[in-house]
Image (spheres, rainbow, N blue to C red):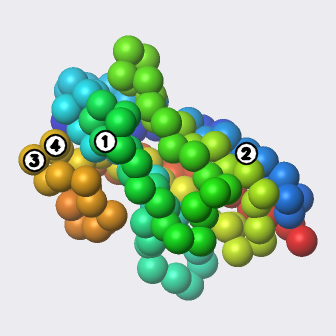
Amino acid sequence: QVQLVESGGGLVQAGGSLRLSCAASGRTFSNYVMGWFRQAPGKEREFVAFISWSGNATGYKDSVKGRFTISRDNAKSTVSLQMNSLKPEDTAVYYCAASRRDNGLTSLARKYDYWGQGTQVTVSS
């Protein structure tokens, strides 16, 4: 089992920044690809970003490329999402997730085995 706890959400004006963090506990953190997903009211959960177990490879949803940066610290078992130039359409609950290494680098939510409880991000116009 892997337990994930997100923090760092909040209310910010358009154009502002937030940094989300996710602390993991349980099994060896470096054995997992880590991802961030989000879900807006009335919409399905969608992929935002992933990072490989080593941190050497990342992937992003097209609409956040150049604005969001995912990073991880395996020594501290944490993964972060730096969000800059936020837009009202970024408003959602953001979830941290972990996927076993043998699933490969994936943006598919169904491939992620463990999920945090989510943190709310609200961007006002």
Instruction: Return the disc, 4 or 1, that comes first in the chain's sequence.
Output: 1
- Closer to us: 92 or 86: 86
Label 4 and label 2: CA atoms lie apart by 28 Å
Instruction: Return the disc, 4 or 2, that comes first in the chain's sequence.
Output: 2
Residue 6 seen from this side: no
Q: Quadrant of the N terminus?
A: top left
| Disc 1 residue type (three-letter) | Ser
Seen as rendered, the residue at the extreme top is: 75
Say which of marks 2 and 1 sits in front: 1
Q: Residue 109's image quarter?
A: bottom left
Q: Which residue is mark 4?
A: 101
Q: Which residue is mark 1?
A: 52
* Residue 38 % position (x, y): 51, 64
Describe residue 4's horizontal placement relative to residue 99 as left or right: right
* Residue 41 % position (x, y): 60, 78
Residue 38 seen from this side: yes
**Does dot 4 land on a helix, a strand or a loop?**
helix
